[in-house]
Amino acid sequence: MTRTHLLTGAGSGIGELVARALLERGDDVLVVARSAQRAEEMAAALPGARTLVADLASPATAESLDLPERLDSVVHAAGVVELGAVADLSVQAWTEQLQVNLVAPAVLTRVALPALRAARGTVVLVNSGAGLFAHPQWSAYAASKHGLRAFADSLRGEEAGHGVRVSSVYPGRTATPMQEKVHAQEGKEYDADDWVQPSTVAAAVLHVLDLPGDATIPDLTVKPR
């Protein structure tokens, strides 16, 4: 039976690599785009993928998504980051990071639960090392990722009886466009070779998705050497 997956963050980085790998092996892939224009761009970049429009910065837009009756997985790979001291971060910076990184995954997962239960599927939340420890300047982003960890832990306990598995993947610094932005905000030079490659994290996500039904991986940390 062909497996069906729903992904956020498939426009670049880890999410895009996971989407490409799933498409290449013949799985059905649905990707979430923030606008109709972005959906067209993603459809061109990911031939064979079905695009759905929902702006994760406005999580309520995910409630009207037309999802299939069965989903073998939902992979939450979208995220935004804005560094800054607590003394300086604006309401907008806090709100956007909490909405995109925490509230949107919660809403989208709730909408997808009937389909996940039908397939005894897997929820994968691409978290961050910041979801385990918060460094200075990272308060808003880390708070959103700590919240995502709490969400995953609660969801795992609630859905175990329905056969739904929940995994959090915690990548350390990974060579993605987001990491390049972080370096710019930190005022540091960026060299992609210094960090975990996104293909490595994508392989970890695929491993979680392909895990036989007799086991689960609640938490998986991937760090640079």
Image (spheres, helix red, strand yellow):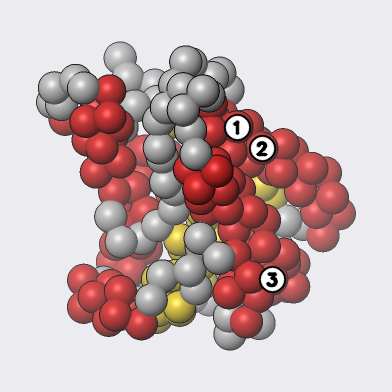
* Visible residue check, residue 146: yes
Mark drawn on residue 147? 2
**How far, Cα to Cα, is label 3 from label 2?**
19 Å
Q: Which residue is mark 1?
A: 143
Q: Quadrant of residue 63?
A: bottom right
Q: Amino acid at mark 3?
A: Val
Mark toward the start of the polypeptide (3 vs 1) = 3
Q: Nearer the viewer, residue 38 or 221?
A: 38
Mark drawn on residue 111? 3
For label 1, the SS is helix
Mark toward the start of the polypeptide (3 vs 2) = 3
Q: Residues within 10 Å of mark 2 (few under 14, many from 20)?
A: some
User: In the displayed structure, would residue 133 be above or below residue 88?
Assistant: above
Q: Nearer the viewer, residue 165 or 100?
A: 100
Q: Amino acid at mark 2?
A: Gly
Frontmost of labels 3 and 1 is 1
**How far, Cα to Cα, is label 1 from label 2?**
6 Å
Q: Is residue 198 left or right of residue 64?
A: left
Q: Nearer the viewer, residue 79 or 1?
A: 79
